[in-house]
Image (cartoon, helix red, strand yellow):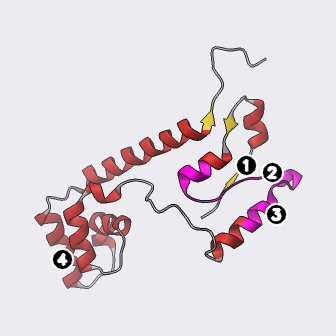
């Protein structure tokens, strides 16, 4: 993944300062400021895409949120039922497995994981959303400075 930041000129006019390197550190993916209308940042964006697609960019070794903490037992059981899935995929198998074309035995194993761990899909989704917004707010607090609304921006 590569994040292309557009409208930086408008942000700057509104007094919003974005620390692109900090945002990149926090997100763990390349972040490139671009202005397609003025052809600015396009070569940097292409270079970042090449690095990522060539697996030359090493992303941060952390997840965006601590998804495993949402339902550790249920995640482990879902991963036994569907090998080679990560924690994020396991959560979504637990929440949505009824809509997936899975063999009956896998459906039953995932159902059992839900029962054994008292997995509540609605509560888990709500907790995931709260974790994501908390993380987004943290990134914003680290990488973006908004103007003081009390001061006249002229």
Q: Which residue is mark 4?
A: 109
- Measured in 3D between alpha carbons, the distance from the residue under mark 3 to the one under mark 1, in whole angstroms, is 14 Å
Would you say 13 lies left or right of 98 here? right
Q: Which residue is mark 1?
A: 6
Q: Which residue is mark 3?
A: 43
N-term mark: 3 or 1: 1
Residue 112 picture quarter: bottom left
Residue at 63% in and 20% down = 148
- 23 up-or-down from 106: above or below: above
Residue 68 part of the magenta-drawn span = no
Residue contact between numbered discs 2 and 1, judged by CB atoms under 8 Å: yes
N-term mark: 4 or 2: 2
Q: Measured from the top left, where is residue 18 in percent x and y?
A: 67, 40
Between marks 3 and 2 in the image, the one whose residue lies nearer the viewer: 3
Residue contact between numbered discs 3 and 1, judged by CB atoms under 8 Å: no
Under tag 2, what secondary structure?
loop
């Amino acid at each position: 993944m590569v994040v292309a930041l557009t409208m930086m000129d408008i942000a700057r006019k509104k007094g919003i300062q974005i620390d692109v390197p900090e945002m990149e550190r926090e997100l763990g993916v390349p972040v490139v400021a671009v202005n397609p209308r003025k052809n600015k940042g396009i070569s940097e964006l292409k270079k970042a895409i090449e690095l990522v697609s060539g697996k030359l960019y090493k992303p941060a070794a952390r997840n965006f949120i601590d998804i495993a903490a949402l339902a550790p037992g249920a995640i482990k059981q879902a991963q036994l039922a569907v090998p080679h899935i990560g924690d994020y995929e396991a959560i979504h198998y637990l929440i949505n497995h009824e809509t997936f074309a899975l063999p009956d035995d896998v459906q039953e194993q995932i159902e059992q994981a839900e029962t054994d761990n008292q997995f509540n899909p609605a509560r888990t989704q709500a907790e995931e959303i709260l974790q994501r917004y908390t993380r987004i707010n943290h990134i914003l607090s680290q990488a973006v400075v908004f103007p003081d609304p009390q001061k006249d921006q002229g």
